[in-house]
Amino acid sequence: MSALLEVSGVSVSFDGFKAINNLSFQNGPAELRAIIGPNGAGKTTFMDIVTGKTKPDEGRVIWGEKSISLLKLSEAKIAQAGVGRKFQ
């Protein structure tokens, strides 16, 4: 099974604080995953990277069967590709 979403080697810092360090994550078609952790663990930053709100310092984010790099797309184009988020 190929990954629908692949995050590889992603790191991001804010003013010297490393919010995410070398994160890798895969999600296949028909899989449901939950991202859990304490406050400050980087959950929101992870979602911000996947949806295009935040660009990582390094790493890659690949989406779909065509292996589209989400890091090269705007937030609107990422949403059109089928990646979105829902707030409670």
Image (cartoon, rainbow, N blue to C red):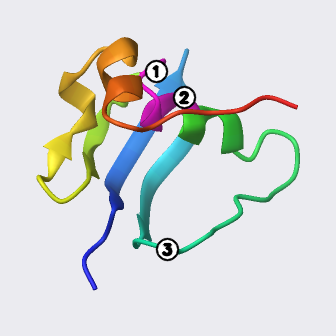
Identify the residue position indicated by label 2 in the image.
Answer: 48
Identify the residue position indicated by label 3 in the image.
Answer: 30
Q: Which residues are magenta?
A: 48-54
- What label sits on residue 16 in the rendered view? none
Residue 87 screen position, x and y as percent: 79, 28
Q: Secondary structure at mark 2?
A: helix
**Of the two numbered discs 2 and 3 in the rendering, the one whose residue sits closer to the viewer:** 3
The numbered mark, 2 or 3, whose residue comes first in the sequence reads 3
Looking at the rendered structure, the kind of residue marked 2 is Asp
Dot 1, how many residues are within 10 Å of its Cα: few (below 14), some (14-19), or many (20+)? some
Q: Is residue 18 visible?
A: no
Residue 50 screen position, x and y as percent: 44, 37
Give the quarter of the figure containing the N terminus: bottom left
Q: Answer whether labels 2 and 1 touch (C-beta < 8 Å).
A: yes
Give the quarter of the figure containing the C terminus: top right
Q: Is residue 23 visible?
A: yes
Q: Which quadrant would residue 22 be assigned to in this image?
A: bottom left
Residue 76 screen position, x and y as percent: 37, 13
Identify the residue position indicated by label 1 in the image.
Answer: 54
